[in-house]
Amino acid sequence: EIIGCKIKGIDKEATYRIARDFISKYYLLVELLRFRKYRYSRKEMARLYLMLYGEDHEVRTPSRIDRRYRDLIAIASKFNYDKYPWIKFSYPKWFYEHLSEILGSYDALELLKALNNRTIWLRVNTLKVDVDKAIKLLEKENIVIERDKDLWYMVKVINAPYPINKVEAVRKYLVIPQDKASALVVEALKPDADMLIYDLTAAPGMKTSLIMQLTENKAYVVAFDVSKKRLRVMKHLMKNLGVDFSHLEIILADSRILHMKRKADAVLLDAPCSSSGAIPKDPAVKIHLRRRGRIEYYSKLQENLLSIGLRLCSDKLVYATCSVFPEEGEEIVEKFVNLNIARAVKPSIIGSPGYFKYKIAPLVKRLFPHIHMTEGFFISQLYPI
Ligand SMILES: C[S@@+](CC[C@H](N)C(=O)[O-])C[C@H]1O[C@@H](n2cnc3c(N)ncnc32)[C@H](O)[C@@H]1O
């Protein structure tokens, strides 16, 4: 039984896929129902979803509401989606309007469409296995993959017969699902052996572990996070991934009020954000972003963290967010550069420049699902002045 609707004869994985797609189409369903001024519950929304998009699953619909659903299905088939493109791709209206102001409506729609689809990337954990062997193991499990041309340890999943977390090599921590854009954040940092690195918002440690992988466990990382629960997951993950704990310190702390005696050689600020760029991985982000206010909350938090990060850094700081909004990217960097607190240097990684209406655009990078087949990411490289 999912979301209150009886679907017979389908397994857990298919149920998960349906629930995920239902969440992704949330705003589309809300608007269709609102159009007819119907009062509705989530359960009724789910039923409508199954009637519109369900395949041959049996949906039990009480006959007394049959007519209402028939009416909605007729509306859905005649709906003028071109007039309401945010409804077509199921986003809050402000989300579409805001991106249209920045990108123009054509590119904004390309982005919204692409955020509805996920490309799965795997990182080979070279602390445990070499790339050729990992590829052979994946192929043995009938996973169709393509080696990435930019990052030697990344592969793109073209087809998998079952969910990626069920793959033996993933279960053994030989390969890890990690988006290519997330790996590019660490590439921008260019970690090296013996470097002291502060990872200010580290949990669950995907990037920390990549720092350790790229330096063959030779960098020294101090990883902070404010969430006890996420740090617990991180410890478990680092152990299983083969990270050397004599080169890693994990500290529960609010990084906005950090005091450290020693400055780090490099600081990573993979900041908490609206996660708007991570919609391909988690469509529920769309529901959390019903109101625009969340962006302001995160941009203030990022400003505070960046200000501390620059004080704790003797050389390079990488500030990144998995957000498609400039308030969590270009605007923050411009503020620090204009105040003469930091200098921005273009990261030497692939990616598009920042949003062109900002002066800082040529010195920062953006990754997009419709261009780079990644999640939406902002990546910048700063030096304290
Ligand atoms: C984008 S996630 C980090 C993901 C991580 N870097 C990785 O690659 O796995 C942001 C993290 O910031 C943490 N966070 C939020 N506010 C914080 C604060 N004031 N101080 C330290 N960590 C914070 C959250 O708990 C969350 O784990």
Image: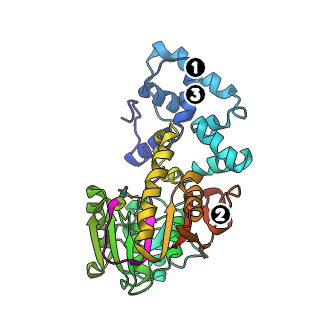
Mark 1 Cβ inside 8 Å of ligand 1? no
Whole-percent x and y of residue 118? 54, 55
Q: Identify residue for label 1.
A: 70
- The Cα atoms of the two marked residues, 2 and 1, are separated by 52 Å
**Quick one: SS at disc 2?**
loop
Q: Residue at x 65, y 61 (%)?
A: 354
Q: Nearer the viewer, residue 10 or 81?
A: 81
Q: Position of residue 75 (x, y in %)?
A: 64, 23
Residue 283 counted in the magenta span: no
Residue type at mark 2 is: Ile
Residue 104 in the image: x percent, y percent?
73, 47
For mark 3, what is the residue?
Answer: 31
Could you tell whether 261 is left or right of 100 in the image? left
Question: Which of label 3 and label 1 is nearer to you?
Answer: 3
Q: Report the Cα–Cα distance between label 2 and label 3.
A: 38 Å
The residue positioned 46% from the left and 51% from the top of the image is: 300
Q: From the image, which quarter does the N terminus lie in?
A: top left
Q: Judging from the image, what secondary structure is the residue with disc 1 in?
A: helix
Taking the spot 33% from the left edge, 60% from the top edge, the residue there is 257
**Residue bounds of the magenta highlight:** 257-273
Q: Which of the two labelled residues, at mark 2 and mark 3, occupies the earlier sequence position?
A: 3
Q: Observer-nearest residue: 4 or 254?
A: 254
Answer with the quarter of the image where residue 33 lies. Answer: top right
Closer to us: mark 2 or mark 1?
2
Q: Residue 360, labelled with which disc? A: 2
Q: Amino acid at mark 1?
A: Arg
